[in-house]
Amino acid sequence: ELNLERNGVDGTAAYYLAPGIVASKTLITLQLSHNPLAHLGATELANVIRGNKTVRTLRVLRGGFSRTAEHVLQMAFSSNDTLIDFNDIVVSGRISVDLSGRQIGNRRQWLYGGRLGLHEIGFLADRLNDTDRLFDVTRRCAALNVENNEIDGQGAGVLCEGLRHNTTVATARLGNNAGMGDAGAEAIAALLAFNTGIYDLEVAKCGFTRVGERCIAKVIAAGSVMETSGVKSNTTLATLNNITVRSTTTIDISGRPGWLESRYGQRIGLHEAAFLGNRVRSDVTAYDVRLKSLKAERNGMDAEACSEVMDGVAANGTLVELQLSHNPLE
C-alpha cells in the first residue's frame, strides 16, 4: 500500500513516480487524493492504469483534473482488468451500485468534489460492460443509481455505452442530471434500442427539450405514430419515470401530486406519453395489459403527446375509464 494523499504531488512528481508503480508487482492500494496532479499527472496515471497489473484500489479524488485530463483517464480503463475500486466506486460483486448525490452533504462535497467526473463515469461504464470480461463477478449488478451527479451529455454518452453492453442491470436511475440535455437523450435512446435487460428506467429532470424527448419516444413507441422505418424499438422496458402499465389496473398520474411532482415534474413529456400509449396496447401479449382506468389530467399534455396516448388507447381492449381534462390538447 502506498499513501501519498495531501502531499502536494504535482504532474512533474507523478512523472517520476509512475514508472516505479508500473513496474511494481506487489502494490495493491494506491492513494493520491488531494494533490495538484492536473493534466500531466492524469497522463502519468493513465500510463499506470494501463501498465500496472496488481493495483486493485486507486484513489485520485480532487486531483485538479480538467475535463480533458478526465478524458485521458477515462480512455485508459479499457486496458485494465485488475482495478476494482476507483475513487470509492466498486462494481465487481455488487448487486446494487448507488452513487446518487455525491455532492450532497458537506463531507461528500469536500471528499468527492460535488460531481461524478468523466474519468469516474468512464470507470463505471467500463466495469458495467460485461462483454468479454475475464472475471464473472462483474455480472451481478442489477441496480444502478447515479442521480444528482451533474452528469452532462458527454458523460451520459460514456455511461450509456457501457450499459449497452451490460446484461444484468434491470433498474437504472439517471434522473436529476439537468446537464444531459438532448445529447444525453440521444445516448439514452441508443441504449434502449440495444439493451433489452433494463426494465425500470428513470430519466426525469435531465434537461431534455422536445427534440430529445422525441429521440427516446421513437425507440419506445413500437407500432405507434412515432415509429419510422429503420428505428429499432424497445418492447422490454416496463417502467419509465414511475409510470408502469404492465399488470396494472389503474393509473392515476394527474398533476403528479405530492412527491411525484417534485421528483418528476407535473408535465408529461413526449417520451413518457409515447411509453404510456405504447404499453396500453392490448394487441401485444408481452405487455400483459389489464388497465381499466387511466387518469392523466393537468399534465401539460399537448396535441402531439395526446396522439401518442390515443394511438395506444385505440388498440386497447380493457380500458373503461379515460380522463384527460385540463390539458392543452388544442
Image (cartoon, rainbow, N blue to C red):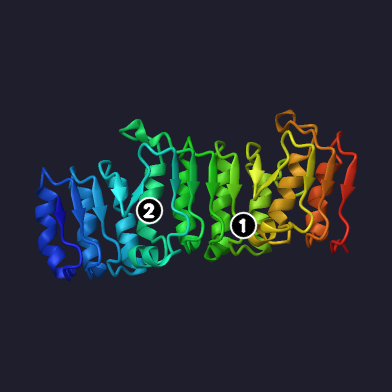
Measured from the top left, where is residue 165 in percent x and y?
Answer: 46, 40
Q: Please, what secondary structure does the residue beneath circle 2 have?
A: helix
Measured from the top left, where is residue 83 in percent x and y?
Answer: 26, 45
Residue name at image x 62 percent, y 57 percent: 204
Where residue 204 is drawn, which disc sits there?
1
Name the quarter where the C terminus is drawn.
bottom right
Depth check: 86 or 67 in front? 86
Outermost residue toward the top? Answer: 285
> Could you tell which of marks 1 and 2 lies nearer the N-terminus?
2
**Residue 230, visible in the rendered structure:** no
Residue name at image x 54 percent, y 61 percent: 183
Q: Quadrant of residue 59?
A: bottom left
> Which residue is disc 2 drawn over?
122
Label 1 Cα crowd, 10 Å radius (few <14 / some 14-19 / many 20+): many
Find the distance from the CA under tag 1 to the CA under tag 2: 22 Å
Where residue 251 is drawn, which disc sits there?
none
**What residue type is disc 1 on?**
Ala
Measured from the top left, where is residue 233 in percent x and y?
Answer: 65, 41
State left or right for residue 20 relative to residue 32: left
State left or right for residue 238 relative to residue 110: right
Depth check: 176 or 307 in front? 176
Depth check: 131 or 265 in front? 265
